[in-house]
């Protein structure tokens, strides 16, 4: 087993506590990259996650962008991150789909992530073929490792990897120390697991944390709608967040994944929406120290 500094490239300088916080991509609803970096810095967050393209939902009419196509934008983003002390804790968009080879489809995107200094990418699967999903995970991990990156996979109801046991089976199948679990607090609890289950597994198998609150019972007709558009700030829902966080490693980024569609539609900008959410997250993490 590698040491933690070897296992999590790019996080060696991390300090526990407040410095772990980041803002996840779906929380900002298409905010352009440089503005996203500045938002995170202004709110005292060290990290952001990003894909090469924005999510489709864009209620505030931001101009469309493409980190895949726009080299000048990539340069401006890198400069902004350097100037503001922000880095990308998670590269997104590496989805396994039926009939598509993730390595062929996303090799160019991985190069973009390298240019942006990304050291960790996340993958999920929408391919109902579990065996093929696991093999695609293995191929993606090998490709990412050649680029100096590690990979996490995210469990969530409705995905192929829908729960913690399936996620652990995927990690065992790939069998590499640079393939770990992304634990999203909402997905974990809603899929039927909790702090006791996390405490029973090797902490080295966990590579990233996403933080959100929610009711214990669904509020929307589909899980996808609630997860993508209307989560709750930490401490305002019913999830046992402190218990879950106490069962997780203390040296990992904690990405705030709290999309608030109703507030965006009411005209609140990202700073107004996410400022209070960041403060809630800080208060929660302070209780761990």
Image: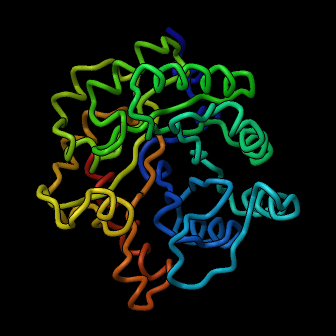
- The extreme right residue here reads 72
- The image quadrant of residue 214 is bottom left
Closest to the observer: 271 or 129?
Answer: 129
Looking at this view, name the residue that lies furthest to the bottom.
267
Residue at horizontal 38 percent and vertical 64 percent from the top: 258
Q: Is residue 198 left or right of residue 92?
A: left
From the viewer's perspective, is residue 255 above or below residue 143?
A: below
| Residue furthest out toward the top | 1
Q: How many marks?
A: 0
* Left or right of residue 223, residue 134 in this image: right
Give the side of residue 113 with respect to residue 88, left or right: right
Task: Tell me if residue 3 comes above or below residue 154 in the rendering.
Answer: above
Which x, y percent locates residue 184? 34, 45
Q: Residue at x 18, y 63 (%)?
A: 237
As rendered, which of 12 and 135 lies closer to the eye?
A: 135
Q: Position of residue 99 (x, y in %)?
A: 56, 34
């Amino acid at each position: 087993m590698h040491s933690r500094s070897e296992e999590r490239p790019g996080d060696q300088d991390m300090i526990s506590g407040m410095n772990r916080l980041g803002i996840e991509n779906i929380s900002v609803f298409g905010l352009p990259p440089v503005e996203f970096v500045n938002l995170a810095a202004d709110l005292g967050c060290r990290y952001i996650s990003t894909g090469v393209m924005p999510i489709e939902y864009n209620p505030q009419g931001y101009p469309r962008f493409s980190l895949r196509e726009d080299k000048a934008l990539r340069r401006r983003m890198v400069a902004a991150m350097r100037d503001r002390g922000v880095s990308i804790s998670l590269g997104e968009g590496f989805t396994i789909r039926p009939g598509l080879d993730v390595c062929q489809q996303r090799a160019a995107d991985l190069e973009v992530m390298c240019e942006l200094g990304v050291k960790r990418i996340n993958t999920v699967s929408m391919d109902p073929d579990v065996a093929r999903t696991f093999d695609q995970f293995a191929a993606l991990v090998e490709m990412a490792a050649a680029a100096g990156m590690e990979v996490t996979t995210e469990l969530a109801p409705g995905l192929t990897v829908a729960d913690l046991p399936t996620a652990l089976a995927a990690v065992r199948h790939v069998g590499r120390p640079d393939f770990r679990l992304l634990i999203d607090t909402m997905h974990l609890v809603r899929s039927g697991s909790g702090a006791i289950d996390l405490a029973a597994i090797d902490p080295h198998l966990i590579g990233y944390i996403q933080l959100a609150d929610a009711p214990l019972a669904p509020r929307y007709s589909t899980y996808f709608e609630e997860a993508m558009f209307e989560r709750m700030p930490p401490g305002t829902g019913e999830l046992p967040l402190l218990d879950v966080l106490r069962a997780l490693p203390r040296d990992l980024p904690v990405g705030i994944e709290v999309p608030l569609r109703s507030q965006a539609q009411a005209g609140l900008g990202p700073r107004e929406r996410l400022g209070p959410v960041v403060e809630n997250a800080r208060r929660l993490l302070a209780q761990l120290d």
